[in-house]
Amino acid sequence: MFLRVAVVVSGRGSNLAALLRALGADAPARVILVISNRAEAEGLAVARRHGVPTHVLQDSADPAEWRRVLEEARAELVVLAGYLKRVPKAVVDAWRGRVINIHPALLPRHGGTGMYGRRVHQAVLASGDEASGATVHLVTEEYDRGPILGQAQVPVRPDDTPDTLAERVLAAEHRLLPAAVLAAARAGRPVPFTLEEAGSQAVELPPTAH
Ligand code: GRF
């Protein structure tokens, strides 16, 4: 028995790749579907390389399409890993408590509408914060405001640029997301977790993005 995980991506898919690397054949969770709003998303190629079925949304605002695809795949957990559009409210409602997102900052700081990609790291540097990191949280109607399940912290260095900070945070994301999924698999639903509880399977990942 394993938890059936659908991952939703809009771009590169390095978090998806990290998750696929972390989930070995005996893992209590398996990625059974990768969904994207963009046919050209690199994350879809990552999925195909791992033999994971993919679906490109015809209309990312159509809740019926989301629900059909998730139900057909018998998904039990939905992971937003670099999904840049809004999940339709009806889907959030129907899947409440079973959709998680990863954000590249220590929420509740530096989240919300328009806070994605480089902008997040620019905001962290402009704020003078001494630490940043990654957050996994439950998805609700409000961007980046659902209950926090786990975080991984990294230092902000005096000579950081948005790019050097982004790289450090991304490495933390690649440890945090598998830990979140493994914790959810053990509990049967997303739960608060720490990196330590996740064990070596999730924390000893190579630093490469793909
Ligand atoms: C990550 O920084 C994630 O936190 C954010 O979007 C980015 C996706 O990167 N939500 P990737 O597609 O997983 O490489």
Image (spheres, grey):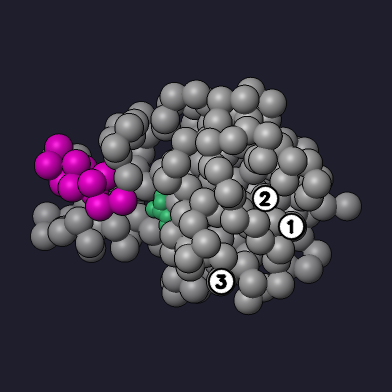
The residue sitting at 23% across, 46% down in the picture is 119
Q: Which mark is residue 96?
A: none
Magenta span dominant secondary structure: helix
Q: Which residues are magenta?
A: 117-127
Q: Which residue is mark 1?
A: 32
Q: Which residue is mark 2?
A: 6
Element under disc 1: strand
Element under disc 2: strand
Q: Is residue 191 left or right of residue 136?
A: right
Q: Is residue 25 left or right of residue 195?
A: right
Give the mark nearest the N terminus, 2 or 3: 2
> What amino acid does circle 1 point to?
Ile
Q: Are marks 2 and 3 in contact (CB under 8 Å)?
A: no
Q: Nearer the viewer, residue 131 or 17?
A: 17
The residue lying furthest to the right in this view is: 1
Q: Residues within 10 Å of mark 1 (few under 14, many from 20)?
A: many
Confirm or reject: label 3 Cβ below 8 Å from ligand 1: no
15 above or below 196?
below
Alpha carbon distance from label 3 to label 1: 15 Å
Q: Quadrant of ligand 1?
A: bottom left
